[in-house]
Amino acid sequence: MTRIHSETHLVGRIGWLRAAVLGANDGIISTASLILGVASASASQTNILLAGIAGLVAGAMSMAAGEYVSVSSQSDTENADLARERRELATDLEFEKRELANIYVSRGVERGLARQVAEQLMTKDALGAHARDELGISEITTAHPVQAALTSAATFSVGAAAPLALALVSPSRWIIPAVSVGSLIFLAVLGTIGAKAGGANIVKPTIRVTFWGALAMGVTAGIGAIFGTVG
C-alpha cells in the first residue's frame, strides 16, 4: 500500500502573514504612541480618545491605500514581465526552450535531461514554466493588491483598537502607564503569534517588535511632555 506523504509549507503564508503582522503592529504602535503623546501633553481624556479614534481611522485608510498602491506596482511589474515573455514565446519558441534548459543546467541537471524537462514543461504550460523558473513568479508570490489592502486595513484597526480600549477604560491618571504596559504586552503577543505562524523562533521576533514599539512610544511621549510643558 502506497503511503501518501502530505506537506504544508509555511512559505504559502508569506503574503497574508506579512500584511497582517505589519498592519496590526503599526496599529498598536502608532495609536499607542499618539495616545501617549497627547496624554503626556496633559490633554483631557476626551481629547485623548478623540485623537486615538482619529489615528485609528486615518491609519487604517493610509495602510489600505499604501498597501494597495505598493502591491499594485508589484502586480504591474509582474504583468509586464509576463506579457514580454508571452511575446517571446510566440516569436522564438526554440530559443525559449534553450533558455529554460540552461536554467536547469545551471541548477545541476544534465543537459540532455534538462532539454527534455524544458520541452515537457513547455508542452503543458510554456508561460507558466518560464514565469516560475525564469521570472520567479508563482501562485505563492503573485501580488494581490485588494487582498493586501483589506488585510492591512483590518489588522491595523484591530491593533489600534487595543490601546484605544485601554485608554477608554482607564482612569485619567492611569492612561499613560496602562497604555504603555498594555501595548507592550500586545506587541509581544503579536510577535509571538507572527513567529509561530511563520514557523520561526519566537524569541527574536518578540524582542524586536517590543523594542521598537517601546522606542516609538517613548519618543512620542517625550515630545508630548515637552510641548505640553511649553504650552
Image: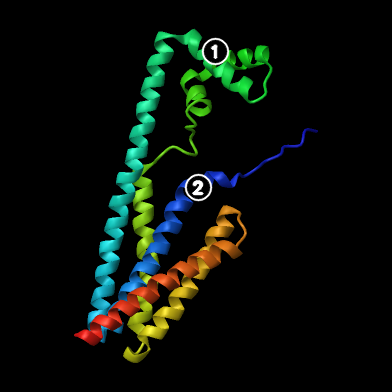
Q: Is residue 101 visible?
A: yes
Q: Quadrant of residue 81?
A: top left
Q: Residue furthest right?
A: 1
Q: Is residue 44 left or right of residue 80?
A: left
Which disc number belongs to residue 6?
none
Picture mark count: 2
What amino acid is found at the position of numbered circle 1 in the picture?
Arg
Which residue in the protein does label 1 denote?
A: 98
Q: Secondary structure at mark 1?
A: helix
Q: In x, y percent, where is residue 34?
A: 31, 73
Q: Residue at x 40, y 11 (%)?
A: 90
User: Which residue is nearer to you in this view: 129 or 92?
Assistant: 92
Q: Residue at x 50, y 39 (%)?
A: 140
The answer to which of marks 1 and 2 sits earlier in the sequence is: 2
Say above or below: 74 vs 124: below
Which residue in the protein does label 2 denote?
A: 14
What amino acid is found at the position of numbered circle 2 in the picture?
Ile
Q: In x, y percent, where is residue 162?
A: 39, 72
Q: Is residue 159 left or right of residue 192?
A: left
Q: Secondary structure at mark 2?
A: helix
Q: Quadrant of residue 175?
A: bottom left
Q: In x, y percent, where is residue 92?
A: 44, 9
Q: Which of the two discs, 1 and 2, sits closer to the camera?
A: 1
Say above or below: 151 vs 216: above
Q: Quadrant of residue 164?
A: bottom left
User: Which residue is nearer to you in this view: 219 or 194?
Assistant: 219
Q: In x, y percent, where is residue 15?
A: 46, 46
Say above or below: 3 vs 191: above
What color scheme is it? rainbow
Q: Residue at x 30, y 77 (%)?
A: 223
